[in-house]
Amino acid sequence: MIFCKAMIDQQWRRGVELLFSSKALPLRFICTGGTCACIQLGLLQMFVHSGCRPIIANTIAFLVSAQVNFLFSNLFTWHDRCSATNAKRAILGRWLAFHCSISGSALLNLAIFTLAHLIMPDLLSCALGIIIAAILNFTVMNRFIFRVHARDGKEVLLLEPVEAVWEE
């Protein structure tokens, strides 16, 4: 019985290590995005069912989902790219950069929803906007928002002043 428990523990640890490895980044992005998409779709359905207009409901659902997405992206998807120095400033800078970035994908998402919901059901239109915006988001997040620079292995945030890099 002890041998079996030890094997399960070892396999569990190995699975967790694999999930948090750099090779699993796309999987973590999909898990985070999928969770946030479900939140957005659920909120959209709830608001529309309560009598809210679909475009307003989708906008509110997107904004709530975006906050959850940032939290999961920072703590799970790109967990290995967190700055150890000046954590509050780093998180604030990353949060601002994240929201600047998703502004563009939000407009794309809302434009797709606005056009698609004329010929498709609301949830399908919303899902289409999410999928197309996700492709843009992964590229921007991975290369700019949650990036790591080679300078001594230290992270430089998109909005961090250049002088801060040389001070460290």
Image (cartoon, grey):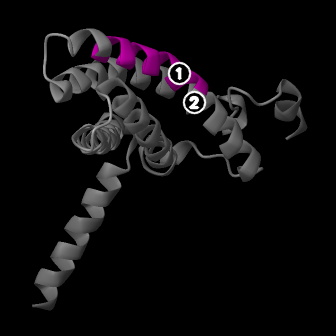
Q: Which mark is residue 99?
A: 2
Residue 104 is left or right of residue 85, and the answer is: left
Residue at left offset 29%, top offset 43%: 31
Q: State the residue position of label 1.
A: 103
Position of the N terminus by quadrant: bottom left
Q: Nearer the viewer, residue 78 or 40?
A: 40
C-alpha distance separating marks 1 and 2: 6 Å
Indicate yes or no whether the magenta region holds residue 112. yes
Image location (x, y in percent) of residue 83: 66, 46
Local crowd at mark 1 within 10 Å, few (<14), some, or many (≥20)?
few
Residue at image position (85%, 34%) is 164
Q: Which residue does the image show at 46% across and 36% down from the upper left?
A: 63
Q: Is residue 10 above or below residue 133?
A: below
Mark 1 vs 2: CB contact within 8 A:
yes
Q: Measuring from the top left, give residue 119's x and y in whole percent.
A: 14, 10
Q: Tell whether 33 sits left or right of 139.
A: left
Provide the major secondary structure of the magenta segment.
helix
User: x, y percentage for residue 158?
Assistant: 68, 26
Quadrant location of residue 129?
A: top left
Mark 2 nearby-residue class (10 Å; few <14, some 14–19, many ≥20)? some
Span highlighted in magenta in the image: 100-113
Whether 104 is drawn above or below 48: the answer is: above
Q: Which numbered tag is attached to residue 35?
A: none
- Where residue 12 sits in the image (x, y, percent)? 24, 67
Q: Amino acid at mark 1?
A: Ser
State the image quarter where residue 33 is shown: top left
133 drawn magenta: no
Amino acid bearing label 2: His
Label 1: element kind = helix
Quadrant into which the C terminus falls: top right
The residue under the point 13% across, 23% down is 121
Query: In this view of the protein, can residue 168 be seen by the observer?
Result: yes
